[in-house]
Image (cartoon, grey):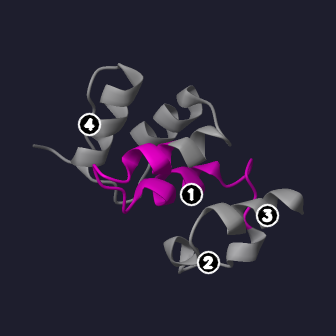
Amino acid sequence: MKARKGIMKIFPKHLFWDMDYSKLSLKRDKDIIIPRALYATTKDTFQEDIAKLERLYSKQEILTCLRNTKERISNKTCVMIAEAYNVEPFYRYAI
């Protein structure tokens, strides 16, 4: 229960508009939480947004999830992640 309340305090509800926000689990739903937390990130907000995720997940979990997600994450976000973690850039959409 604490994890669910934590999610509700960390991430804005509008990121999870299509689901019951109160039933999210940090462990079970990381494939939803990680990309949604970065869905609206910008160059200006990226450091704050990624810091929130890193308090909950490892860098490897974040990378793996973003590389495999079906969520609509921009290529710009993927490049920012790759640069932050010093890995080869990856893209969600063909460029």
Q: Check disc 3 and report the residue beneath it.
A: 4
Mark 3, residues whose alpha carbon is within 10 Å: few (<14), some, or many (≥20)? some
Residue placed farthest to the right in the image? Answer: 1
Q: Nearer the viewer, residue 47 or 68?
A: 47
In the image, what residue occupies the spot 39% across and 60% down? 39
Q: Which residue is mark 2?
A: 19
Residue for point 26% across, 28% down: 89
Picture disc at residue 79: 4
Tell me the element at label 2. Answer: loop
Marks 1/4 in contact by CB < 8 Å: the verdict is no
Element at label 1: helix
- The residue wearing badge 1 is 32
Q: Name the N-terminal-most of marks 2 and 4.
A: 2
Whether the residues at callouts 2 and 4 have beta carbons within 8 Å, the answer is no
Q: Amino acid at mark 3?
A: Arg
Please rate how many residues cluster around mark 1, counting C-alpha atoms within 10 Å: few if below 14, some from 14 to 19, many from 20. Answer: some
Which image quarter is the N terminus in? bottom right
Q: With 10 as the anchor, is 69 left or right in this view?
A: left
How far apart marks 1 and 3 lie (CA) works out to: 14 Å
- Compared with 34, 83 (above or below) is above
If you read the primary sequence from the N terminus, does the residue marked by circle 3 or circle 2 appear first? 3
**Residue depicted at 58% across the width and 76% down the height:** 13
Q: CA distance from mark 2 to mark 4?
A: 28 Å
